[in-house]
Every structure is written in C-alpha cells, then in structure tokens.
Amino acid sequence: MKFNDFFNAIDKPYFSSMDISLRRLVVYPHQLSLWKKQGKIASLKRGLYFFTERKEALRRELVASLLYAESYMSLESALSYYGFIPDMVYTETLVTSRTNRKFSNVFGTFLYRHIQAKLLFGYDVVETGAGKYLIAQPEKALLDYCYLNLGRIQGIDDIQALRLNYHEIAEKVDRKKLLRYREQFQVQKLNRVTDLLLSLC
C-alpha cells in the first residue's frame, strides 16, 4: 500500500496496529519502518504511531490518554492546570488502576501512578479535534495528590512545604464535594491531612 493511500485512509492524526487490522489495510512492518526512516510517521509507543504532518493536532494530554488506558490526568499536571502549584510541570502525571508505568516520546514524559479501581472517579471529559482525554476535577486532583504522598506528609509543616496556592484552592474547590469524594478513600490519615490543608485556605 502506498503511503498517500494509507494517510488518506486514516482519518485521525494517530493510528495503531489495531486500526490497520480493523480497516483491513495491507501495510507490512517493513513499510512502517521505511515510513519512520523517511520521517512520515513516528512512534508514540510500540504499536502506536502518529503522522508527523498531523503532529500539531495532537495535544500532550490526548497523547497521555492514548498511551495507557484506564487513566486520567491528575496529581501535579492537574494541580498546575488549576493553578494550585506555582511550578511549571514538564512531566505529565496521571493516575490509573493499572500498574505504574512511564513513557517517553517526542511529546514528553508521561508518568502513571496506580490507585485502586474504585477510586477512578471525579474527572471531566475534555474533547479535542483529534479525540478526548480525562482530567481530574479540582477536588479529586487534591485528594489524589495527598493520597499518593501520604508517606511524606506528617503535619502542617509538610503541607506548607508543598507550596500550594491556597487562594486558588479556596476559590476553585467545592469543600462539600471534596469531603464527599474523600469518603470513598476510607483512609483516616487522608482525612487529617486534607483537614489541615483546608484550614490554610
């Protein structure tokens, strides 16, 4: 199959080996290798590619959702998005019910942290022209972050060391929703930590 025919047969910026099979396209591994060498396609991970000509249509957040299923943007990435932390985030951070993973490609580094499947809630769906991704709501982003960092948070001093923007948290976090979400974790230390955090806002 010629590249231009393949390019026109795929109606999105990215494609997988499964897409090729489902569309019954005749594309051989050596052709994919050749197109990679020619710079026409590039890898996101094994078996997942994107068209370099359509790269601008892919957002990092969408790439993050494509790399690892059953995940959503949270932790530092979501905290930065909502203005809860002052620092720029260079690694996209997500939570997943699957095992911890890390991917790196031309779009950046993507880190996936494991949480229980029952805790995969409290996120919004964001539509883009090339697909959709999930991002934690402000309340869930804070809870996920505290929950996965409980080992290094012992008291108010440790919370202050996180350099959170309390003004933004006070404006954007629905406390009733946070407390309702917190009940699903059933972790006493998380209750204490978030109570201390809210007292600063």
Image (cartoon, grey):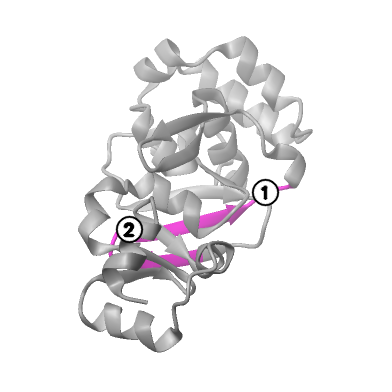
> What residue lies at 43% left-to-right and 15% top-to-bottom?
172
> What residue lies at 30% left-to-right and 52% top-to-bottom?
90
Give the image location of residue 145, x and y in percent.
53, 40
> What residue lies at 34% left-to-right and 49% top-to-bottom?
60
Q: Is residue 109 magenta?
A: yes
Q: Is residue 180 visible?
A: yes
> What residue lies at 56% left-to-right and 66% top-to-bottom?
18
Give the image location of residue 104, x and y in percent.
38, 67
Q: Where is the C terminus found, in terms of image quarters?
A: top left
Q: Magenta stretch mostly in which secondary structure?
A: strand
Give the image location of residue 122, x and y in percent.
61, 28
Cα separation, mark 1 vs mark 2, equals 40 Å
Q: Is residue 29 magenta?
A: no
Question: Closer to us: mark 1 or mark 2?
Answer: 2
SS assignment at label 2: helix
> As shown in the figure, which amino acid type bears the numbered disc 1?
Ile
Residue 115 circle label: 1
| 147 horizontally vs 2: left or right | right
The residue nearer to you, when weighing 128 against 183, is 128
Nearer-N-terminus badge (1/2):
2
The residue nearer to you, when weighing 175 against 35, is 35
Q: Which residue is mark 2?
A: 8
| 89 horizontally vs 72: left or right | left
Give the image location of residue 12, x and y in percent.
38, 51
Q: Image quadrant of residue 41?
A: bottom left
The residue nearer to you, when weighing 92 against 164, is 92
Give the residue at the far bottom of this rendering: 30
Range of residues picked out in magenta: 102-116
